[in-house]
Image (cartoon, rainbow, N blue to C red):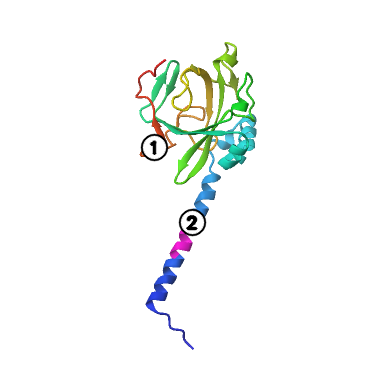
């Protein structure tokens, strides 16, 4: 016996199919993004590869919070770039910084970055980079280094996420989002801060930042 389905029932079925497909596509896209790596990921040195692997757990920002990282709330954006003494910030963004005060000290550990950096994407935060950070007072007069790279600086603290008097050195490593200007460049043109969000902070205009 042939079953008759009303136009309304058929319409509801089609809507349900569309919604289900959209949900599955979104879930698949989210997994794919979580697995996305820089274009040169296969060429990472052993120490960089080991550091990246050890930090993968922080794809979940709640895991970072449980391990002592605190959100600085603001999404830092340099839409026109800036300079701060010896440090040049090309146009791009940094994202949202999560800081772990317990990791700050006179020695740098590849497994313990002082900062994790996330990019807001919709209602989620996506891990894009890690940052090794050292205050000038802890550096003992010498710019520290890690991964064969000398940290940039010294520079003032970046308002509003830290006081400007906190002079420091830092090194950004874009493990999870390819940076067109290089893995160790401070800003990343591929990272976006929501333009109209209250927590987006636009910094610099290619002039020297205040010292």
Q: Tell me the residue at 59%/29% (across/down).
A: 113
x, y (%) of residue 35? 56, 45
Q: Quadrant of residue 110?
A: top right
16 lies above or below 203:
below
7 lies above or below 145:
below
**Marker disc for residue 25:** 2
180 lies above or below 4:
above
Which residue occupies the foreground of this view, 32 or 211? 211
x, y (%) of residue 196? 36, 39
Look at the image and say whether residue 22 sits in the magenta stretch. yes
x, y (%) of residue 95? 46, 34
Query: In the rendered structure, which disc, 2 or 1, sits on the residue that comes first in sequence?
Result: 2
How many residues crowd around disc 1 within 10 Å: few (fewer than 14), some, or many (20 or more)?
A: few
101 lies above or below 13:
above
Q: Main secondary structure of the magenta part?
A: helix
Q: Tell me the residue at 44%/27% (across/down).
A: 160
Q: Tell me the residue at 48%/58% (across/down).
A: 23
Horizontal placement of 76 versus 135: left or right?
left
């Amino acid at each position: 016996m042939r079953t008759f389905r009303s136009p309304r029932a058929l319409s509801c079925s089609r809507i349900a199919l569309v919604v289900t497909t959209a949900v599955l596509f979104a879930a698949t896209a989210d997994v794919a993004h979580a697995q996305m790596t820089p274009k040169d990921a296969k060429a990472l040195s052993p120490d960089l590869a080991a550091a990246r692997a050890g930090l993968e757990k922080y794809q979940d920002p709640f895991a970072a919070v449980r391990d002592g990282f605190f959100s600085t709330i603001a999404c830092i954006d340099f839409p026109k770039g800036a300079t701060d003494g010896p440090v040049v910030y090309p146009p791009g963004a940094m994202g949202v910084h999560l800081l772990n005060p317990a990791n700050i000290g006179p020695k740098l550990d590849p497994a313990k970055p002082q900062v994790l950096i996330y990019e807001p994407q919709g209602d989620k935060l996506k891990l894009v980079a890690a940052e090794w950070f050292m205050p000038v007072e802890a550096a003992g007069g010498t710019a520290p280094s890690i991964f064969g790279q000398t940290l940039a600086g010294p520079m003032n603290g970046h308002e509003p996420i830290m006081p400007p008097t906190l002079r420091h050195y830092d090194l950004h490593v874009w493990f999870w989002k390819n940076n067109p200007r290089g893995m160790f460049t401070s800003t990343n043109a591929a990272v976006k801060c929501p333009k109209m969000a209250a927590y987006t902070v636009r910094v610099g205009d290619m002039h020297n930042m205040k010292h």
